[in-house]
Amino acid sequence: MIGRYSNMYYQTRWVPLRRRGLGWHRCNVLFKDHKCVASCGLAYGKVLELVLDVKGCNLNCKYCWCWKMRHGEEILKYPEDVLRDLECRFDEVSRDFFVSRKGYRVGVIRITGNEPSLQWDHVFELLKLIDRSKLNGCKVIVETNGILFGMGRVSFEGLDELEIDIDIDVSFKGVNYDQFEWLSSSRREYFRYQIEGFVKLFDYYEGSNVNVNPVLGINHAENYCVWRGRRYVMDVEIVDERGEKLDFYEYSEDFENEVLSRRELRYDEAPFREYFGINRDTARLVVAVVYEGKRFLHVLPSEIPDLV
């Protein structure tokens, strides 16, 4: 079964590592010729992650960090081909002089991009291959909106038969129906499927090698680009259709009773960042920037210098 991928962010993920003195890895030059889909970035601390960006989504989020990916070139690969990309990148990075000298190591494989559940049969076959490979010591993180699991259109059983540790991060597009409808540009009832998808996954895999987490898919954040002295001077707010700052603690009753009763919501996973793959026109609709005490509605952080 063929999977659809993109390597649009391949080089971008290595940039923070270059700033940390890890050089410009040769894979960042050769990846286009090889159509490699296994990019490499920083997971946390000195742990690196290999990242697979699948292509295609069932939502249309206004702030989507990989909107351009949906409309760009796709790379078609069988699970065996993807495993070869992962193992090749793992080997190349692991024996890199700068990586080893700085004490970094590859410890995570992240399957993300648009929406992995749209090609779940392919993803599941890939996970089985990883389980039997040299990469089986890596934690695997699968990021999903959970909707197809909630609808019952995808069979998620079998992951607990693998020996690898798996995190399934269910990315909620808001914490109530109004927020979901506004942020995802999708039918509000799909938020219910997000809840049901999380509950099904969590209850089925509780106590196993599969850890299911609720994650807020977008959040307010200080903008990392503007640091003055010992403080940030630019804040990014996520706003509703009236331009008012969204309250991500304004839970719907079923979200609070069914999701938060099982596990605490992670707020730190997806702060707003102005990635080059966003749709700038729709992203502006959900953003306000506060810079040196002045609030700029429907303006992206990079546009502030032209306004002050």
Image (cartoon, rainbow, N blue to C red):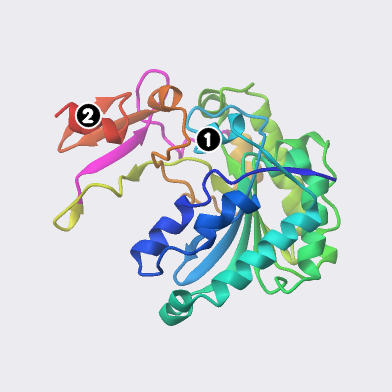
When asked about the image quadrant of residue 94, the answer is bottom right
Locate residue 236 relative to residue 58 in the image: left or right.
left
- State yes or no: residue 241 in magenta: yes
Q: Which residue is mark 1?
A: 174
Three-letter amino acid code of the residue under disc 1: Gly
Let me know if residue 261 appears in the view. no
Q: Position of residue 37 (x, y in %)?
A: 63, 52
Locate residue 82 relative to residue 45 in the image: left or right.
right
Residue located 23% across and 35% down the image: 290
Q: Is residue 186 above or below residue 121?
A: above
When asked about the image quadrant of residue 83, the answer is bottom right
Q: Which mark is residue 24?
A: none
Three-letter amino acid code of the residue under disc 2: Arg
Q: CA distance from mark 2 to mark 1?
A: 23 Å
Residue located 60% across and 32% down the image: 70
Q: Is residue 58 above or below residue 27?
A: above
Q: Is residue 135 above or below residue 61?
A: below
Disc with the residue nearer the chain's start (2 vs 1): 1
Locate residue 205 relative to residue 94 in the image: left or right.
right
> Where is the C terminus found, in terms of image quarters?
top left
Q: Which residue is mark 2?
A: 295
Q: Is residue 119 above or below residue 269?
A: above
Q: Which residues are magenta?
A: 232-252
Q: Position of residue 162 (x, y in %)?
A: 81, 66
Q: Position of residue 136 (x, y in %)?
A: 72, 71
